[in-house]
Image (tube, coloured by chain):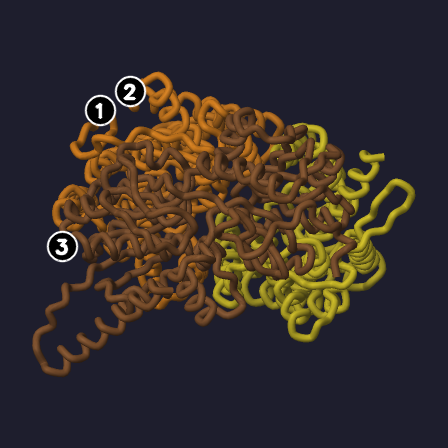
Chain colours: A brown, B orange, C yellow
């Protein structure tokens, strides 16, 4: 509570003094705004998530200056294509953009990273999970998003927390995994970590399916035939909708469906389309921290600007990307790339939107402090149910069967 | 009746070509890095278009799956580099061989079984998609996880190892494109070129004249595939990361063939002109679309522009422009 | 029993795919043009049914006649005003024309509806019939039934109506048809309209099974290609057979091998058929 007040005081103070200075006609002492470039896939096949991230860009444009940060944002569309991401990054830099934020997708982020390195312009990745990006020795690239291996590790660890909290203990699981970049890196991570994770269940079957599939009835039939207690699913959005719909139709009722850290089951569309069948779906993923005042302010602004949409981690991480840039600029006090990079390396942001300790970067430019929460859909909303200190509700597991729902 | 290439360059055409080469050589020194990055896209498009043009423009066999050869070239050279440290240029030679074999085999199978026209076009799509899905499961090259090339030390240009700035890639691609132009010109004025054009105009008549239609069609495909694969190799070292779903994408196949059709199928300079116009138009549309903050506007205008061109100049813009500039060759 | 379930499911989905491919086959069989905008036209129909459902709450099955009629009109107009001029042009020009149309349709849908997937809410959307050990998905049964009815209607049109017979005459011998005084231009327009009507109906039926997004069109265009080539371009029973074959073989491949490889299975089947029997299973040489 105290935090909110000080921040608001500061915000008001800044605005007031600005008005005062403007009123007296004196040259404003404030530093010149830094130009930030945003690159997101707003058209093309990734458009749904790109546009969902874009909402946070619009909010950052409004909220960060209100918080006293001197920034302006130029935003462009990567059309879901790495080559467009590359030329657009070049164009932004040409237009004098001093830091880049983006680009949701690993391929596009990698293309932008190369441009950023060549020109010596800092690039903060909002979302992109391919571990290879931070293994390249890039000097100007910083990522405030877990790698797919980190997601897998964290995700598996949360299973045990969930079982401890609910007393449930499934003996077998079937794993459905989408065969794309994200799904397969995660699958590799899961197979490597399973023996060490000390989980009560074993994976009896792994079903890898085509990301472009329009019909997953066979895949679900195969999962059902495995007769496992638990369905683990590494998915995207449209496919997980198909999966749950088929599960209802085929009356396939495992103890629950849990994602060890993939998109899909926390998104607005999932809830909108599936209604009551979306409830109780669990995803182990970094989430907005319900116990942080800053997260509340961001979520409130989001809900006001976009009624009917759910504020997800897409928006949260994208917003934090801009917070990181604004914070680095404030501390660097200069737009010199070297000064900005030094400031980014020294990043230590305690007031967060997402769950977890302060934002810091390791030598590779990776934030390694990004724990996953257990997020369960309850009454049509994604709710943090674990860890207990961040939770708003207690987890329910095993989940009620399809026919037992209102 | 499509005009055939002249045996010699008239002074006017030589001057025009000289001017074009001079402008292209100087251009990267005069413009900023953003324009250079766009020009690299233009040259990739031009070179792939030129390679495809040999198969479809000269020999008349519509291929809608050329992304297959881009991918084979890219993956062969990149994988050999990553796993064995083989020099990119040697890897690219290997990639060309693989692609030539694949293209030749696909053509031989198709033409042996008398698959032609639209059926052949759809068959090329099928092979490209089939290969894409195989690569999605091909662990040695990273499958869907992607294949990454080390990107350290991009600071100074090293043409031997294909590490360097976009400007280096620009000159490299310009050289490839000019070489493709020269090769196309050369082939068109040889017996093989005449045979290809005879097959394109009327396959039965060509066969009646005693041309070994099967052999020349397979040769066109193998050559076209090998050239495409060379470009694919360069693409691998420019992008430094490969995912089957973007490298072998159907949309890439479509992009490859749009430029030469717009420019003028079967002409020497059409693919280059088409690449310049389409990439330029696309870039302007992207920027307008960003300024207007409407997603999809670019694709809409792009579609409308294609429609306008196919309605007004269905045989391409280069034949029309050539007439305008007075660069028509003689009576051939 | 499990296999029976899977085969039946593949059969039902395949019937809808068949109706969609039927449109492509009819157009090619008569006009000799490959409709590269086929999937896009179907997605347009899906959005049409979606809008009526969202506004008026009508079941896509009730909206189907309306959407089918609208797509017929669209196809008729397109052929009359635009495509007809390209009938005698080389393949690549036809390809570019339809590619341009496809691009415009997708971009318009993206601008109009945004990228998010849209779906219809049906109160029977999750129901299934239990017959012995077989579990039948209700919407899938409806969709397949609709597809079979649609195909039957089209077949009787070509078989019994004057216009239908004239179109068949036209397909067999265009010059002859002109000589005996048939209005070939109008017949072509009717044919393209019918092809579009097929995807219109298929789109409404498919909307029961999948959510619609602007970008799914290309996948359906490709799927339609595979199906008609398997069955034989221009052959009506071939398109249905091809659809069912793809439906069942993908289902079995998905179950027995690796699901993510199942579309490779379809492409492989296509390559095999093209090489062994280029005219397709039921096509005429």
Spot occupied by residue B106 in the image (x, y as percentages of width and height): 53, 27
Q: Tag 3, which chain?
A: A
Q: Which residue, given by chain and number where applicable, does mark 2 sit on?
A: B87
Please rate how many residues cluster around mark 1, counting C-alpha atoms within 10 Å: few if below 14, some from 14 to 19, many from 20.
few
Q: Tag 2, which chain?
A: B
Task: Give the position of the C terminus of chain B as an image quadrant.
Answer: top left
Q: Foreground: B228 or A63?
A: A63
* Residue A110 falls left or right of residue A260: left
- Mark toward the start of the polypeptide (1 vs 2): 2
Please rate how many residues cluster around mark 2, counting C-alpha atoms within 10 Å: few if below 14, some from 14 to 19, many from 20.
some
Distance CA(mark 1)–CA(mark 2): 8 Å
Q: Foreground: B260 or A351?
A: A351
User: On the image, which quarter does residue C278 sit in?
Assistant: top right
Q: Tag 1, which chain?
A: B
Q: Give the residue drawn at x 72%, y 39%.
A: A218
Spot occupied by residue A46 in the image (x, y as percentages of width and height): 47, 51
Q: Give the residue drawn at x 62%, y 28%.
A: B113
Q: Give the residue drawn at x 82%, y 57%.
A: C149
Q: Which residue, given by chain and number where applicable, does mark 1 sit on?
A: B160
Q: Which residue, given by chain and number where applicable, does mark 3 sit on?
A: A334
Of all residues shown, which one is farthest toward the bottom?
Answer: A23
Using the rendered image of the protein, determine whether residue B188 is visible from the camera's viewpoint. no
In this rendering, the answer to whether B328 lies above or below C204 is above
């Amino acid at each position: 509570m105290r935090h909110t007040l000080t921040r608001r005081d500061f915000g008001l103070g800044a605005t007031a003094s600005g008005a005062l200075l403007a009123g007296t006609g004196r040259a404003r002492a404030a530093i010149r705004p830094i130009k930030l470039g945003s690159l997101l896939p707003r058209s093309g096949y990734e458009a749904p998530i790109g546009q969902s991230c874009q909402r946070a860009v619009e909010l950052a444009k409004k909220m960060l200056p209100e918080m006293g940060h001197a920034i302006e944002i130029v935003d462009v569309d990567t059309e879901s294509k790495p080559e467009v991401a590359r030329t657009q990054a070049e164009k932004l830099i040409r237009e004098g953009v001093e830091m880049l934020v983006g680009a949701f997708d690993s391929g596009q982020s990698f293309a932008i990273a190369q441009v950023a390195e060549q020109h010596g312009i800092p690039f903060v990745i909002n979302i992109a999970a391919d571990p290879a990006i931070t293994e390249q020795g890039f000097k100007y690239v910083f990522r405030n998003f877990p790698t797919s291996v980190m997601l897998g590790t964290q995700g598996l660890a949360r299973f045990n927390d969930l079982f401890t909290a609910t007393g449930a203990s499934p003996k077998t699981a079937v794993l459905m995994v989408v065969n794309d970049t994200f799904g397969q890196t995660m699958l590799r991570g899961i197979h490597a970590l399973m023996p060490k994770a000390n989980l009560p269940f074993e994976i009896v079957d792994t079903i890898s399916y085509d990301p472009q599939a329009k019909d997953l009835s066979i895949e679900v039939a195969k999962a059902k035939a495995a007769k496992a207690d638990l369905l683990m699913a590494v998915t995207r959005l449209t496919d997980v909708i198909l999966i749950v719909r088929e599960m209802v139709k085929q009356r396939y009722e495992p103890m629950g469906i849990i994602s060890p850290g993939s998109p899909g089951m926390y998104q607005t569309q999932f809830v909108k389309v599936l209604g009551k069948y979306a409830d109780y779906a669990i995803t182990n993923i970094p989430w907005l921290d319900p116990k942080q005042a800053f997260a509340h302010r961001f979520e409130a602004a989001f809900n006001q600007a976009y009624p009917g949409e759910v504020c997800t981690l897409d928006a949260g991480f994208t917003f934090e990307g801009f917070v990181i840039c604004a914070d680095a600029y404030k501390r660097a006090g200069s737009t010199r790339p070297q000064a900005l990079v030094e400031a980014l390396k020294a990043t230590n942001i305690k007031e967060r939107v997402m769950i977890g300790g302060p934002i810091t970067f390791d030598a590779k430019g990776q934030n390694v402090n990004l724990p996953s929460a257990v997020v369960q859909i309850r009454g049509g909303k994604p709710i943090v149910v674990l860890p207990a200190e961040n939770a708003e509700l207690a987890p329910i597991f095993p989940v009620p069967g399809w026919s037992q729902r209102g | 009746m499509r005009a055939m290439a002249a045996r010699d360059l008239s002074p006017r055409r030589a001057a025009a070509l000289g001017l074009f080469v001079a402008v292209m050589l100087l251009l990267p020194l005069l413009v900023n890095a953003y324009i250079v990055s766009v020009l690299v896209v233009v040259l990739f498009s031009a070179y792939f278009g030129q390679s495809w043009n040999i198969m479809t423009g000269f020999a008349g066999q519509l291929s809608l799956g050329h992304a297959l050869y881009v991918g084979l070239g890219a993956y062969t050279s990149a994988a050999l580099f990553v796993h064995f440290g083989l020099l990119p240029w040697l890897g690219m030679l290997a990639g060309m061989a693989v692609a030539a074999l694949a293209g030749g085999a696909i053509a031989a199978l198709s033409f042996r079984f008398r698959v032609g026209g639209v059926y052949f076009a759809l068959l090329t799509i099928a092979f490209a998609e089939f290969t894409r899905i195989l690569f999605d499961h091909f662990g040695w090259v990273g499958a869907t996880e992607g294949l990454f090339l080390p990107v350290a030390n991009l600071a100074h240009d090293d043409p031997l190892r294909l590490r360097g700035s976009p400007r280096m890639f620009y000159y490299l691609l310009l050289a490839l494109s000019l070489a493709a132009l020269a090769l196309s010109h050369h082939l068109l004025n040889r017996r093989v070129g005449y045979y290809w054009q005879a097959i394109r105009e009327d396959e039965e008549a060509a066969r009646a004249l005693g041309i070994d239609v099967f052999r020349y069609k397979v040769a066109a495909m193998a050559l076209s595939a090998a050239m495409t694969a060379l470009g694919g190799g360069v693409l691998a070292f420019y992008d430094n990361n490969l995912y089957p779903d973007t490298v072998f994408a159907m949309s890439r196949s479509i992009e490859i063939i749009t430029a030469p059709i717009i420019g003028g199928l079967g002409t020497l300079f059409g693919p280059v002109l088409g690449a310049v116009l389409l990439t330029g138009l696309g870039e302007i549309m992207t920027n307008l679309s960003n300024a207007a903050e409407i997603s999809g506007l670019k694709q809409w205008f792009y579609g409308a522009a294609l429609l306008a061109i196919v309605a007004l100049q269905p045989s391409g813009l280069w034949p029309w422009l050539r007439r305008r500039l007075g660069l028509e060759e003689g009576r051939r | 029993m499990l296999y029976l379930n899977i085969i039946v499911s593949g059969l039902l989905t395949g019937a809808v795919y068949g109706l969609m491919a039927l449109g492509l086959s009819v157009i090619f069989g008569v006009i000799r043009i490959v409709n590269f905008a086929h999937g896009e036209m179907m997605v347009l129909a899906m959005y049409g049914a979606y809008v009526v459902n969202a506004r008026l709450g009508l079941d896509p099955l009730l909206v189907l006649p309306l959407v089918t009629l609208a797509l017929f009109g669209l196809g008729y107009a397109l052929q009359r005003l635009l495509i007809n001029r390209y009938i005698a042009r080389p393949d690549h020009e036809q390809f570019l024309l339809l590619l341009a149309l496809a691009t415009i349709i997708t971009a318009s849908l993206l601008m109009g509806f945004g990228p998010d997937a849209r779906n219809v809410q049906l109160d029977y959307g999750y129901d299934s019939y239990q017959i012995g050990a077989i579990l039948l998905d209700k919407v899938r049964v409806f969709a397949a039934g609709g597809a079979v009815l649609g195909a039957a209607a089209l077949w009787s049109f070509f078989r019994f109506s004057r216009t239908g017979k004239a179109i068949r005459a036209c397909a067999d011998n265009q010059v002859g048809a002109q000589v005996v005084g048939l209005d070939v231009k109008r017949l072509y327009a009717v044919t393209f309209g019918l092809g579009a009507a097929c995807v219109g109906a298929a789109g409404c039926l498919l909307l029961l099974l999948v959510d619609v997004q602007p970008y799914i069109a290309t996948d359906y265009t490709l799927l339609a290609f595979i199906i008609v080539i398997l069955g034989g371009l221009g052959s009506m029973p071939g398109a249905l057979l091809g659809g069912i074959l793809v439906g069942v073989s993908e289902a079995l491949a998905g179950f027995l091998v690796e699901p993510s490889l199942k579309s490779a299975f379809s492409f492989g089947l296509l390559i095999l058929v093209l090489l062994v029997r280029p005219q397709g299973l039921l096509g005429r040489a």
